[in-house]
């Protein structure tokens, strides 16, 4: 993996990828932007970089892109508003790559068949417990009343509209309500905090039997033929 594959933040990944597409080392890009190489390395790898607008503007100019391309302007729009990249590559993720992407937890979609309605997908906050997905829900909600023997799925994805890149992982298996007191205590210790709030005291464990994923990356071939620091052309 390159340093652009696993940075701490989207901002760091965008900076690293645009620097690599421009054919620049960290030292070269930092010199063009008038900043210390160590600071640029920090921006690419820090879990919480917070550069000012002037810094982003100088760095964007050094890399031949717009400040918005680095900052992720337009990320509040619904996904899919931008055109596909010129050189997308669809990559099938290995099981190890899938696990690495979903390991931090966050928000995923629980997919199941609701009695009287049909297939539905509900976003939930989750944590991984080994290979299992664990999340909380309301005891009177549709999820708790529809888990059991039926096959269910869980989807986690990430889209970067600015770079026209993203990935998705889907797990399929069975889910059950956690009822054993010791197991409930263990699940509670995972620290799952639903954004939706409310009384969500029922824990669900999804045990996957299959895990698949894919990612879309941009090769950068169109940009590699340009002079270093020139602005990539988008159509």
Image (tube, rainbow, N blue to C red):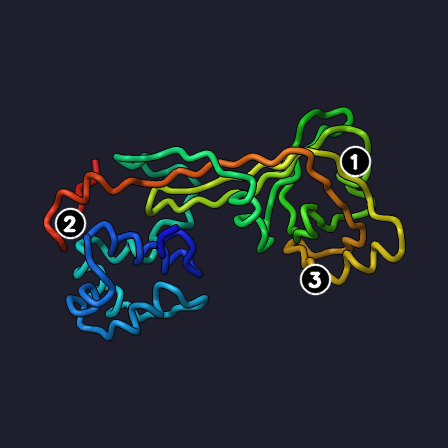
- The residue closer to the viewer here, 209 or 55, is 209
What distance separates the C-alpha of mark 2 from that of mark 1? Answer: 52 Å
> Which residue occupies 72% across, 25% down?
117
Q: Which residue is mark 3?
A: 191
Distance between mark 3 and mark 1 Cα atoms:
22 Å
Label 2 sits on a secondary structure element that is: loop
User: Which part of the image, by quadrant, shows the C terminus?
Assistant: top left
Q: Earlier in the sequence, mark 3 or mark 1?
A: 1
Where is mark 1, residue-wise? 147
Q: Position of residue 202 (x, y in %)?
A: 80, 50
Q: Are marks 2 and 3 in contact (CB under 8 Å)?
A: no
Q: Earlier in the sequence, mark 2 or mark 1?
A: 1
* Figure quadrant of residue 91: top left
x and y percentages locating residue 226 in the rendered image: 12, 45
The residue at the point 22 percent across, 73 percent down is: 35
- The image position of residue 11, as x and y in percent, is 37, 59
Q: Which residue is mark 2?
A: 231
| In the depicted structure, whether residue 188 falls above or below residue 165 | below
Among all residues in the image, which is located at the extreme left? 227
- Callout 1: few (<14), some (14-19), or many (20+) C-alpha neighbours within 10 Å? many
Between the C-alphas of marks 2 and 3, the distance is: 45 Å
- In the structure shown, which secondary structural element does the residue marked by tag 1 occupy? loop
Q: Residues within 10 Å of mark 3 (few under 14, many from 20)?
A: few
For marks 2 and 3 on the same chain, the one whose residue lies earlier in the sequence: 3
Q: State yes or no: discs 3 and 1 in contact (Cβ < 8 Å).
A: no
Which residue is found at the position 37% from the left and 44% from the top? 161
- Left/right placement of residue 55 relative to residue 107 reads left
């Amino acid at each position: 993996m390159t340093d652009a594959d696993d940075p701490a933040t989207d901002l760091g990944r965008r900076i690293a990828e645009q620097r690599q597409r421009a054919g620049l080392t960290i030292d070269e890009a930092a010199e063009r932007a008038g900043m210390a190489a160590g600071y640029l390395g920090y921006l690419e790898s820090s879990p919480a970089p917070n550069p000012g607008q002037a810094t982003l503007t100088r760095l964007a100019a050094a890399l031949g892109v717009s400040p918005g391309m680095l900052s992720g302007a337009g990320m509040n729009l619904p996904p899919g508003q931008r055109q596909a990249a010129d050189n997308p590559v669809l990559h099938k993720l290995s099981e190890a790559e899938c696990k690495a992407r979903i390991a931090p937890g966050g928000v995923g979609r629980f997919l199941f068949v609701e009695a009287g309605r049909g297939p539905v997908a509900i976003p939930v906050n989750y944590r991984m417990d080994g290979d299992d997905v664990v999340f909380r829900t309301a005891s009177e909600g549709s999820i708790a009343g529809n888990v059991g023997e039926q096959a269910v799925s869980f989807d986690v994805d990430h889209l970067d509209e600015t770079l026209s890149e993203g990935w998705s992982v889907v797990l399929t298996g069975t889910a059950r309500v956690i009822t054993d007191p010791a197991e409930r205590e263990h699940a509670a210790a995972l620290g799952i905090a639903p954004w939706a709030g409310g009384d969500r005291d029922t824990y669900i464990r999804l045990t996957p039997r299959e895990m698949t994923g894919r990612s879309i990356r941009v090769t950068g071939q169109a940009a590699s033929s340009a002079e270093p620091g020139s602005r990539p052309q988008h159509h």
